[in-house]
Amino acid sequence: MGALEYFPESFEQEDLPNKVDIDALFAEAQNVLDNVTSEDRIDYLYQMGGSSGGARPKVLINYNFDTRIITNGIDGNSGSLPFILKFPSSNDLLDIANIEYAYYLMAIDAGIEMSRSALISSSKGRQFFITQRFDRVDSGKLHMHSAAGLLHDDFRYSTMDYGHLMDAAFRLEKSVVAYEKILRMAYFNLVTNNRDDHSKNFSFLMDSFGTWRVAPAYDLTYSTTSHGYHSTSYYGESKNPTIAHIKSLAEIFKVEHVDKIIDQVNESVSNWTTIAHNTGVSAATSEMIGKYIDNAIKGK
Ligand SMILES: Nc1ncnc2c1ncn2[C@@H]1O[C@H](COP(=O)(O)OP(=O)(O)OP(=O)(O)O)[C@@H](O)[C@H]1O
Ligand SMILES: [Mg+2]
């Protein structure tokens, strides 16, 4: 992702079909996860953009909101915009795409900036989450740096705290608004149990004038991670962060509107059950996440 380009010395290019069959691609991605993919299919998936990073398989596509046609992401297609299409990994809940879309709607409503995203249905009736690429703009490509890269943080054994992120965001944006952006994401992740908040799940973008800003949020979903800790700590606390830790961060960085941020996020996430219902999240998942959110906003 981002604007750095490289060209492999030799690369056998396959002619990609212009129109994308997501059911077929999903089957290919599953074959990779099941270890039964032949090498040429790996090359094909790679060409479809399978190198964008993250644990889940994904492809780069162009999507036209009016016609709902998906084309391959290699060539520009008029009227289409560049998107990432995420496939589930083998240990994801069946309604992972619906959950991620519901989280997207809640995050937007909570005042968190995110790229336009959608749920799309395949011809076999499966639903997938797609999100518009924020490193692609009308004028071209934006450079992108993850917090992991910028702060030299090993995202698997992270020592990053939301305080470090707030500091980095302020230094790059040169505005106190950057503190609020990170604090809002931090509180949202706390009450929605997004513990997969590792340092590659936060990025910064740089335009052609060298101006940096915090990238829109991405990869927001319910996640306990393998050990139940938040990857990024809250004022030193990773296991059971509370509003008190959010307030301590706000105090250090002199974020005046912390109560307003908390209220806005609480108001948005308290609509979980309705949003989950409207986005096709299963009843069992909705109830599980709903309970978590209820307790979290009551400070339990
Ligand atoms: N809207 C976007 N625009 C540009 N790049 C993005 C966008 N969303 C995600 N990315 C990039 O793609 C990578 C993978 O996306 P994402 O984090 O959503 O996938 P994942 O497989 O769920 O990740 P994880 O391994 O953290 O669970 C991100 O780390 C980020 O670099
Ligand atoms: Mg991620």
Image (cartoon, rainbow, N blue to C red):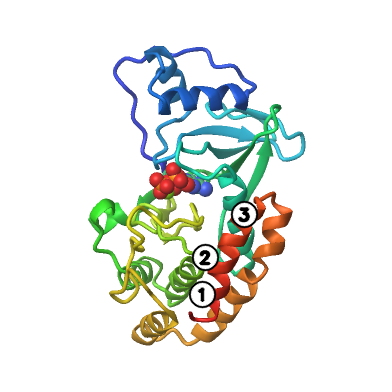
Of pointers 3 and 2, the one earlier in the residue sequence: 2
Please name whichever residue, 238 or 22, is drawn nearer the observer in this view of the structure.
238
Residue 83 is labelled as none
Task: State the SS at label 1.
Answer: helix
Residue placed under numbered mark 3 in the picture:
284
Q: Nearer the viewer, mark 3 or mark 1?
A: 3
- Taking 299 as reference, is 102 above or below it? above
CB of mark 2 near ligand 1 (< 8 Å): no
In the picture as drawn, the residue positioned furthest to the front comes out as 284
Tell me whether the residue at label 1 lies in contact with that at label 2, contact meaning CB atoms closer than 8 angstroms: yes
Identified by mark 2, the residue type is Thr
CB of mark 1 near ligand 1 (< 8 Å): no
In the picture as drawn, the residue positioned furthest to the right comes out as 66
Q: Nearer the viewer, mark 3 or mark 2?
A: 3
- Whether residue 135 is visible here, answered yes or no, is no
Task: State the SS at label 2.
Answer: loop
Identified by mark 1, the residue type is Ala
Q: Quadrant of residue 270?
A: bottom right
Residue 192 is labelled as 2
Residue occupying the point 28% across, 64% down? 160
Q: Could you classify mark 1 by the number of other residues whose Cα lies within 10 Å: few (under 14), some (14-19), or many (20 or more)?
A: some
Identified by mark 3, the residue type is Ala
**Is 243 displayed left or right of 289 in the figure?**
left
